Amino acid sequence: MKAMLMRQWGEPSQLEYAELDRAAPAPDEVRVDVRAIGCNLPDILIVQGKYQRRPPLPFVPGWEVAGVVESVGDTVKDLAPGDRVFALPGLGAYADSVCVSAAQTYRLPPELSFEQGAAFGLVYLTSYVALVERGHLRAGETLLVHGAAGGVGLAAVQIGKALRARVIACASSAEKREVARQAGADVTLDSGGDWVEGVKAATGGAGADVIYDPVGGDVFDGSMKCIAFEGRLLVVGFAGGRIADVATNRILLKNVAVIGVHLGLYRQQRPEQARRWMTDLLALVEAHRMQPVVFKTFPLREAAQALGVLAGRASYGKVVLIP
């Protein structure tokens, strides 16, 4: 099989388009003929050796795929060869074939293409866990989404609207703000401007009830200045590069909750609950309440270029690889 192989820690430009042996699925796995692969910012960090976990070298990066089931392990009952699926292998996705746990594999609804399927699993499940499980977002509340045109941000905008919240979207360009608006944002703000005052103005001074922050750093600091009484600030990631310090006096003064969101731990420790959340998300897709946005596709062998687009913040939605 063809795959992008990383032999040493470094940059995406060091990924090697290689021929690897095709393994048979374990008893609880399925082998997927990959038609599309989702690119994510953690792919860059794991290649650089800067992610929370470092796989043994050499390895094939990549979190998510969509495709057709080739074969199934002996204990797999709910999937069969020929099924259209999307899956979250967690590693090994940058390939034209991959073995994945059946527990991390889901039927692809007819409403979604393979490209959209590869753009769905990780970011939508992350945002659903953040807003529903951790943030307890309620209908009628105000949700502020930072990085609102990125993968997780755009998913958060769509899920927030599906939950009947009022959504304020922050993004860095007019094009990205228009993407967020089309996804359902009620108010859009320039992340390079005085968005703190913009949030206050949009909420009559009350601030946002729930803030979705995949950026960190200065964005986290500003969010603490425009969060509502009993607001929930969701720490989803640190795409901005700086990990902010928490001013605990601000937490106390407004009864604010600062809440971490780590999807991987739920997938490891509560896999059945993660599947229930995905079932809820797929019901929203089938009801035409949300749909992934694909910015651009690249051939698999151009994975480094695709990740360069992500690193340069030039994209919106998801960047996808095609074997």
Image (cartoon, rainbow, N blue to C red):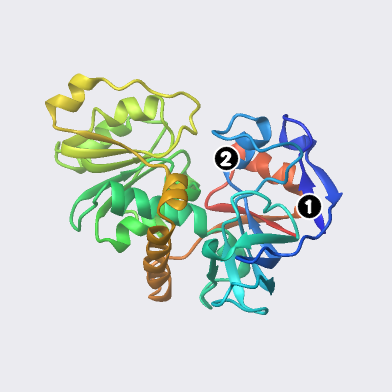
Task: Examine the rendered structure and indicate whether residue 198 appears above or below residue 275.
Answer: above
Quarter of the image for the N terminus: give it.
Answer: bottom right
Helix, strand or loop at mark 1: strand
Quadrant of the rendered structure where residue 298 is?
A: bottom right
User: Label for residue 42?
Assistant: 2
Q: Position of residue 53 (x, y in %)?
A: 58, 35
Residue 207 seen in the figure? no
Residue 71 seen in the figure? yes
Q: Who is closer to the viewer here, 28 or 7?
A: 28
Q: Residue at x 47, y 49 (%)?
A: 268
Q: Who is closer to the viewer here, 136 or 211?
A: 136
Task: Examine the rendered structure and indicate whether residue 155 appears above or below residue 227.
Answer: below
Q: Position of residue 77 (x, y in %)?
A: 56, 77
Q: Residue at x 18, y 56 (%)?
A: 140
**Which amino acid type corresponds to the residue marked 1 in the rendered image?**
Ala
Quadrant of the rendered structure where residue 235 is?
A: top left
Q: Position of residue 51 (x, y in %)?
A: 57, 33
Mark 1 sits on what residue? 3
Quarter of the image for the C terminus: give it.
Answer: bottom right
**Which amino acid type corresponds to the residue marked 2 in the rendered image?**
Pro
Categorize mark 2 by other alpha carbons within 10 Å: few (<14), some (14-19), many (20+): some
Residue 140 falls left or right of residue 33? left
Residue 11 falls left or right of residue 204? right
Q: Residue at x 14, y 40 (%)?
A: 204
Helix, strand or loop at mark 2: helix
